[in-house]
Image: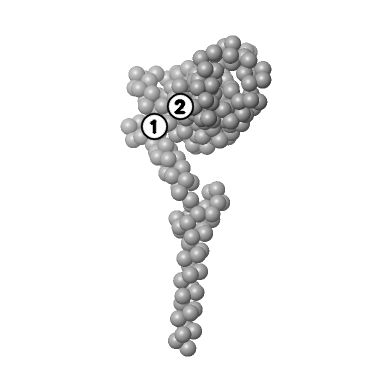
Amino acid sequence: MKMKLHVVEISSLFLFGFEHRNMKCISCEGKYDGDAGACKQCYEDLKAKVAFLTMSNEYPLTSWPDVVLSSLDYGHPDGPVKDTAHTVVLASRSPVFKAILENETKEIDLYELWPQGLGAFVRYLYTAEICLDQQLARSLLGVAKKYQVHHLEDLCQKFLVSNLNWDNSLATYTFGHDHNDKQIIDAALMVITNNLEKLASSREYAELKESHPQLVIEIYERHFASL
C-alpha cells in the first residue's frame, strides 16, 4: 500500500513538472517552460508596452484633444489632413514632443506622413497597437526615430527584418542606409549575399549600381568576407 502511494506521488510530481515545462503562451500560443502565463519574449513585449503607455503626471488629461497634428496633403483638395491628440499623451510618448509642447505649441506638422500614416501613428500613441505593412513600417520608422518613440521604432525594425526576402532585400537595404539603421542593414545584407547570383541580374540591382555604387561595394565586401 505504501509502495503504491509512493508511486502515485511520484507520478503526480512528474505530471506537475511536465505540465509546467510545457505551458502555452496566452499571447503567441507557443509552448514554453514555466508558469508565468506568457513566454519570455511576449512577457518582455508586454512590459515594454505597459511602460510605453504609462502617462506622465506633469500634464493634466483634458477632456478634449488640445494639439493639432498635420500630415502632407498629397493632393488632398482640402490641404493637409489634420488629426488631434492630448498634450499629456504626446508628452508621455516622446521627449521630442514634450520639448515642443513646453513652448505651448498647439500645432505640430508631421509632413513625413501621408494621411493614413498620420491616423495610424496617432492611434498607436494612444493604444500601442498597429497593423504594419512594408510602406507603413518604413514611413513610421523614420517618424519614430525623429521623435524618439522607441517602442514604435523597435516594432517597425522587427517587422521589416522579419519580412525580409530576396525580392525586397535591395529596397530594404537602401532604406536601412537612408535611416542609418544598422540592424536593418545587417539583416538585409545577409539575405542579399545569400541570393547574390539571382539578384545581380535583376533590374533593381542595376538601378542600385547607378544610384548607390558605394552600397554595391559594401555588398561585395560582405559577400567575399562570408566565403
Name the amino acid, label 1.
Ser
Q: Residues within 10 Å of mark 1 (few under 14, many from 20)?
A: many
> What is the residue that sits farthest to the top in this orientation?
210
Q: Is residue 213 left or right of residue 59?
A: right
Displayed quadrant of residue 53: top left
Image location (x, y in percent) of residue 150 = 43, 31
Q: Residue at x 45, y 49 (%)?
A: 40
Displayed quadrant of residue 210: top right
Q: Relative to residue 160, is residue 4 depicted above or below? A: below
Q: Residue at x 52, y 17 (%)?
A: 217
Q: Is residue 92 left or right of residue 124?
A: left
Image location (x, y in percent) of residue 153 = 47, 30
> What is the residue that sits farthest to the front in this orientation?
227
- Mark 2 or 1 closer to N-term? 1
Is disc 2 in contact with disc 1, using a CB cutoff of under 8 Å?
no
Q: Nearer the viewer, residue 42 or 50?
A: 42
Give the numbered dot on residue 92.
1
Q: Nearer the viewer, residue 210 or 181?
A: 210
Image location (x, y in percent) of residue 226 = 51, 30
Q: Kindly state the secondary structure of the residue where label 1 is placed.
A: helix
Asked if one can make out residue 16 in the rendered structure from this viewpoint, the answer is: yes
Q: Nearer the viewer, residue 205 or 24?
A: 205
- Picture mark count: 2
> What is the residue that sits farthest to the left in this orientation?
58
Q: Is residue 167 left or right of residue 24?
A: right
Q: Residues within 10 Å of mark 2 (few under 14, many from 20)?
A: few
The residue that label 2 is drawn on is: 182
Name the amino acid, label 2.
Lys
Q: Relative to residue 2, is residue 135 depicted above or below? A: above
Image location (x, y in percent) of residue 199 = 64, 23
Asked if one can make out residue 71 in the rendered structure from this viewpoint, the answer is: no
Displayed quadrant of residue 101: top left
